[in-house]
């Protein structure tokens, strides 16, 4: 900072003001300081600045995986809003592992984020304890828990499964299947499991068997998961007419495996997914799916964070926000018309 001040011909205090609060500095002086900063390659030490201001400028986001396009959309929507208010996003991922979630949470909290965003609503007691003790805004996204830690912006994964089942039942199918992941030690896709449970619940309400509901493989799901799950379904319920996959990735794998086997989609097997991934729109036939606006979910989360951090009196936990972003069926060509 001293070298920048010497090169620009100003005091170190002026350099500090340009870095921390540029609007209070005359434009000509500010430009001279910024040119000196650029010439010297100076990068302000935000960690040191945070010690005095008690602000780090970071918001933490914890995702289950980095390979899911919907989670990438959440991060994009969140980042776009936060950038406009001079906050940066710090991202960690857990691979659906609760033990790793706790480790990553400790790492994030050690960096003193000003708010933290977690995907889903299933956390260990230790994670809940750490979050409550952090004394910063806590936001759970992509789910609608009955007992949230604080703020919630998401949708009901249970309702996703019920919606898929009702959609297929309304088209006259009576032999339905669904595919998701199994629980393997500490690895569990809670959101996908809720979709499966919602699907099963709707089948039971309609008096139909759940023989075709298959839990196969472990999260994160992929095209390969769809291939293996379809083969398992064919062994257990070979007369299945229509299938719901808890992820479009699995659903696309099912479509490709059907084509390899010479099965016609949707005539021999109707297929429905979740997530509205780009590949589902591009395959032939295009995939019928359930859509959630994940980019919008991220944007809403960002706006709430900015409001919370800008408020002089944060809301009490009992007044926490709860936002349902909703969901919608997108009809394409992998489900046979009624």
Image: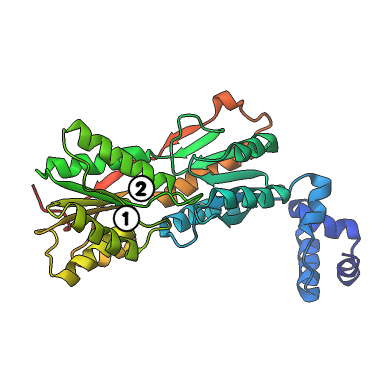
CB under 8 Å between discs 2 and 1:
yes
Q: Please identify the residue farthest to the front as the structure is shown.
A: 235
Q: Residue 81: x percent and y percent?
A: 54, 50
Q: Tell me the residue that label 1 is attached to.
A: 276
Question: Where residue 154 is drawn, which disc sits there?
Answer: none
Which residue is located at x 49 percent, y 50 percent? 185
Q: Residue 190: x percent and y percent?
A: 43, 45
Spatial CA distance of label 2 from label 1 is 8 Å
Q: Tell me the residue that label 2 is attached to.
A: 292
Q: Nearer the viewer, residue 200 or 74?
A: 200
- Image quadrant containing the N terminus: bottom right
Question: In the image, 202: left or right of 9?
Answer: left
Circle 2 SS class: loop
Circle 1 SS class: loop
Q: Residue 13: x percent and y percent?
A: 89, 56
Which residue is located at x 82 percent, y 49 percent? 51
Question: In the image, 286: left or right of 28?
Answer: left
Q: Say whether disc 2 or disc 1 marks the residue closer to the N-terminus.
A: 1
Which residue is located at x 18 percent, y 65 percent? 258
Residue 280 visible here? no
* Residue 249, image quadrant: bottom left
Q: Nearer the viewer, residue 43 or 282?
A: 282
Which residue is located at x 21 percent, y 37 percent? 203
Residue 334 visible here? yes
Q: Nearer the viewer, residue 249 or 7?
A: 249
Question: In the image, 145: left or right of 22?
Answer: left
**Looking at the picture, does residue 256 appear above or below residue 53?**
below
**Looking at the picture, does residue 147 appear above or below residue 305?**
above
> Badge 1, how many Cα within 10 Å: few under 14, some, many 20+?
many
């Amino acid at each position: 900072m001293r070298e920048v001040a010497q090169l620009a011909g100003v005091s170190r205090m002026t350099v500090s003001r340009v870095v921390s609060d540029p609007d209070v500095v005359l434009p000509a002086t500010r430009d001279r300081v910024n040119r000196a900063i650029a010439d010297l390659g100076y990068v302000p030490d935000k960690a040191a600045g945070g010690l005095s201001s008690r602000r780090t400028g970071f918001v933490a986001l914890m995702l289950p995986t980095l390979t899911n396009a919907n989670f990438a959309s959440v991060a994009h929507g969140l980042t776009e809003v936060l950038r406009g208010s001079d906050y940066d996003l710090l991202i960690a991922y857990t691979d659906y592992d609760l033990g790793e979630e706790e480790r990553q949470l400790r790492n994030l909290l050690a960096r003193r984020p000003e708010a933290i965003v977690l995907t889903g609503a299933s956390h260990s007691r230790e994670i809940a304890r750490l979050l409550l003790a952090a004394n910063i805004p806590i936001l759970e996204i992509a789910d609608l828990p009955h007992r949230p830690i604080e703020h919630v912006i998401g949708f009901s994964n249970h309702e996703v499964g019920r919606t898929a089942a009702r959609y297929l039942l309304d088209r006259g199918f009576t032999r339905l299947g669904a595919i998701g992941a199994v629980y393997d030690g500490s690895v569990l896709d809670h959101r996908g499991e809720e979709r499966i449970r919602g699907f099963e619940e709707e089948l039971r309400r309609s008096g139909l068997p759940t023989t075709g509901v298959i839990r196969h493989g472990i999260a994160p799901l992929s095209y390969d998961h769809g291939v293996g799950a379809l083969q398992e379904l064919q062994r257990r319920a070979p007369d299945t007419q229509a299938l719901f996959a808890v992820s479009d990735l699995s659903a696309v794998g099912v479509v490709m495996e059907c084509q390899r086997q010479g099965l016609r989609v949707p005539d021999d097997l109707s297929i429905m997914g979740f997530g509205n991934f780009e590949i589902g729109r591009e395959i032939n036939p295009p995939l019928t799916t359930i859509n959630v606006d994940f980019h919008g979910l991220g944007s809403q989360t960002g706006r709430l964070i900015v409001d919370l951090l800008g408020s002089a009196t944060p809301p009490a936990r009992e007044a926490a926000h709860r936002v349902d972003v909703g969901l919608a069926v997108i009809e394409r060509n992998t489900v046979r018309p009624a």
